[in-house]
Amino acid sequence: EVKLLQSAAELKKPGESLKISCEASGYRFTDDWIGWVRQMPGKGLEWVSMIYPSDSDARYSPSFQGRLTISADRSTNTAYLQWRSLEASDTALYYCVRPIYSRGYYFDRWGQGTLVVVSS
Amino acid sequence: DIQMTQSPSSLSASAGDRVTINCRASENIRVYLSWYRQRPGEAPDLLIFDAATLETGVSSRFSGSGSGTDFTLTISPLQYEDFATYYCQQTYTTPITFGQGTRLDMK
């Protein structure tokens, strides 16, 4: 069974750094992309980024490019999303997703979500 | 970016009803469209991809149609677990974009 297990909720102050994780299991990690979707409080879904662990090819939404970094560790089957300097506007629920290619990339598996709260 | 617009933004229905949710793309996306259901407090679930292909394990009460710029998700008959928010998503090009969501409430 494919599972995406995400790290626990985080409470951070503006300007702090953060790295959240997503451990994949039940499939060959290097065969598929893995990515992130943001959901701000009471709002809809926004695609953030995705990475192909086999060669670390990474794609970003222009809305998030430069603000965060996606990475993947093939030895632990884990994907990461990292911020160098958090802002209050980063407060959201972040879902780990597995993009599957058919006609474009749809997300067939979702993690349980990691809540990130940035507040002074 | 391709803009996805869903209608209505919310609707009320009863168990057993047939409901239709619409999704319009700002440009031609052929059949590169998926639908998701998000129950309160849960992660979204994939329902349909490639506009009309039912994801494995998803009930046949769900069906999708459309191509180009106009798409439809139909649920019939509604069951209690279907009262949720529904999102369409274009997979034609990056950045991947979602509709704003349609909230389906119990009447």
Image: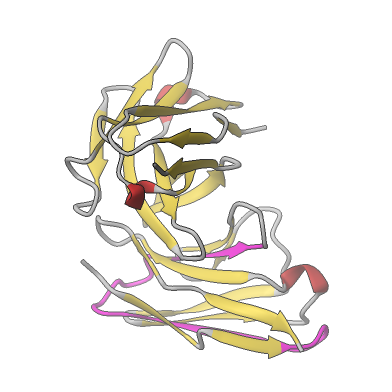
Asked whether, in this view, residue A11 is left or right of residue A72, the answer is right
Q: Which quadrant would residue B4 be assigned to in this image?
A: bottom left
Asked whether, in this view, residue B107 is left or right of residue A106, the answer is right
Residue A77 higher or lower than B51, as above or below: above
Residue drawn 35% across and 48% down? A88
Residue A114: percent from left, percent from top: 53, 39
Q: Quadrant of the N terminus of chain B?
A: bottom left
Magenta range is B13-39
Residue A82: percent from left, percent from top: 33, 30
Residue drawn 51% across and 65% down? A42
Residue B12: percent from left, percent from top: 68, 89
Q: Quadrant of the C terminus of chain B?
A: bottom right
Asked whether, in this view, residue B14 is left or right of residue A96, the answer is right
- Look at the image and say whether residue A35 sits in the magenta stretch: no
Residue drawn 73% across and 71% down? B82
Q: Nearer the viewer, residue B26 or A103?
A: B26
Residue A38 higher or lower than A96, as above or below: below
Residue A87: percent from left, percent from top: 30, 44
Residue drawn 61% across and 26% down? A26
